Amino acid sequence: MAGYDKFLAAHRDRTHAVYVGANDGMLHAFAAGTGDELFAYVPRSLFPKLAAYTSPDYEHQSYVDGTPAVGEARVAGGAWKTVLVSGSGGGATGVFALDVTDPAAFSADKVLWEFSGADDKDHGLPDPGTADPEVPHRRRHQDRSGHLWLVRCRPVGLQFNNANSEKRAALFLLSLDKPAAAAWELGVNYHKIILRRPTDSALVNALSTPGDYAVADGSARFLYAGDTQGNLWKFDFTGNAPWSKDNALGLNKQPLMVAMDGSGADAKRQPITVAPEVGVGPDGGAIVLFGTGKFVSPEDLGHASRGVQTMYGVYDNGVALPANDARAQLQSRQAVAASGQLFSSVTGDAFVHGAFDRKTTSRRGWYFDLPGGLDRGERLVSRPVLSDSQLFFNTLIPNASACSGDGGGRSCAVNAMTGLSQGGTCVPSSDGMLEAPLLVQLGEGGYSATDAFGRRSETRRLAVINPGGRRGISTAQPVDGGKTSQVAGRLNWRQVVDYRGAKP
């Protein structure tokens, strides 16, 4: 993009930095090479809480415990900057953006903006255990040439306790190119999409972090986000700004599907609390990959919180699935425990992605229930990772109480399109609450022989490293992620006939 090559050349040798929300009221920046602190930043929304540190009766509370994200974008004036965006986690309703183009020379004028519940009451309190904003994405703006860079906010984790009188959740989009001195103005430098009233008033209503479906230049066309009432929402950004519930909430303001633990009147809604992964499906549609489960409140530890939780792969062909019977349109899979072992493989019949048809194998995707949901409380509470056509994910199996041990779960991989795996794909873990999988490639890849069409497959072996928490010590356990293949090399050719030697 225009000007980016000069920006890259000017800052190629800058100090590399690591950014950490330390839960002491500050976001800290450390030099990656030496560990020296470069700067610390206290968000304005945290100021009222800092005095509690001096109290003899102090009890622990959350401060800046959100996870920051760093990306490069154009800000006010069209200049390229490296921007850090972070929420305050459980500490406050705020999200902030900093210019960290040169982290070794940070100063007060590098604060781009802050946004909190004081700017809009519908911006609630994020859950500290969920994901924070990711690298900013860009959206077309009807009044400008080029791009308007926005932070997907109300992606700052699950938003509980907002001040909306009807307890309606909202998706916020904040403009990175807002001048620091400008006030926040709805429809101009931030946009808000308010969802419908909660279906079940007895259940908490909170929107989770979105996953995106982007085009080649990185611009997101659609966002997909679940909520704690089991709704999977689709947001359409193919049009121009400003966006609102009237022009950005897809599928006629209905969710793409509702996650339920069964069919019929007795089925219970399954909470979706982490961002889905989104892959490319048939005919340009998206495959939305996600799991269900919640681990936020004290009641999520008890036996009463145990229930059927599920992994889903849903094909979006532009039509919503039936609200009370989504499972009928998905192909079921079974998580099967191997004899005498604790891990599972996932098996099931073949199907074709498309509009649901009872007479054929055309289905809207796949699903399987986590095998330990009912008896052990197994659930998905950390983000899955899509790579090399495989969906990698970690489940949580909590202990009945915080004092009885560290808990565990499983580390798994399934084919993203089919939901199937081979025996031994899921392995048990006792490392507490696992984070999102980290993938690394083991050694060099290999290639198959070329077929009649000039195609060959590249085979790579991946490993999964799972950071966990065991008695406060970070642990990492490599797990063989198996082999994945993709088409490589020349796809086809055609022969050009030499007309000069051709006979009539």
Image (cartoon, rainbow, N blue to C red):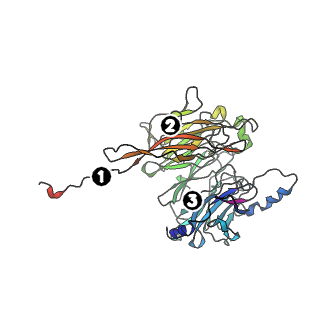
Residue 215 in the image: state x and y as whole percent: 48, 58
Which residue is labeled 2 in the image? 421
Disc number lying in front (3 or 2) = 2
Q: CA gap, disc 1 to disc 2?
A: 34 Å
Whether the magenta-drawn stretch holds residue 24 is answered as yes
For the question of whether residue 141 can be seen, the reply is no
Q: Which residues are magenta?
A: 21-36
**Front one among 136 and 207:** 136
Among the two numbered marks 1 and 2 on one chain, the one whose residue lies closer to the N terminus: 2
Callout 2 environment at 10 Å: few (<14), some (14 to 19), or many (20+)?
many
Q: Magenta segment, principal secondary structure? A: loop
Which residue is labeled 3 in the image? 246
Q: CA gap, disc 1 to disc 3?
A: 48 Å
Residue reaching furthest top? 340
Label drawn at residue 493: 1
Q: Amino acid at mark 1?
A: Trp
Q: Is residue 25 left or right of residue 419?
A: right
**Front one among 40 and 320:** 40
Callout 1 environment at 10 Å: few (<14), some (14 to 19), or many (20+)?
few
**Front one among 407 and 463:** 463
Q: Is residue 279 left or right of residue 129?
A: left
The residue positioned 35% from the left and 47% from the top of the image is 455
- Report helix, strand or loop for mark 2: loop
Q: Amino acid at mark 2?
A: Ser
Q: Amino acid at mark 3?
A: Asp
Residue 65 in the image: state x and y as whole percent: 71, 54
Residue 378 in the image: above or below residue 12: above
Which quadrant, please, contains the C terminus? Answer: bottom left
Residue 341 in the image: above or below residue 105: above
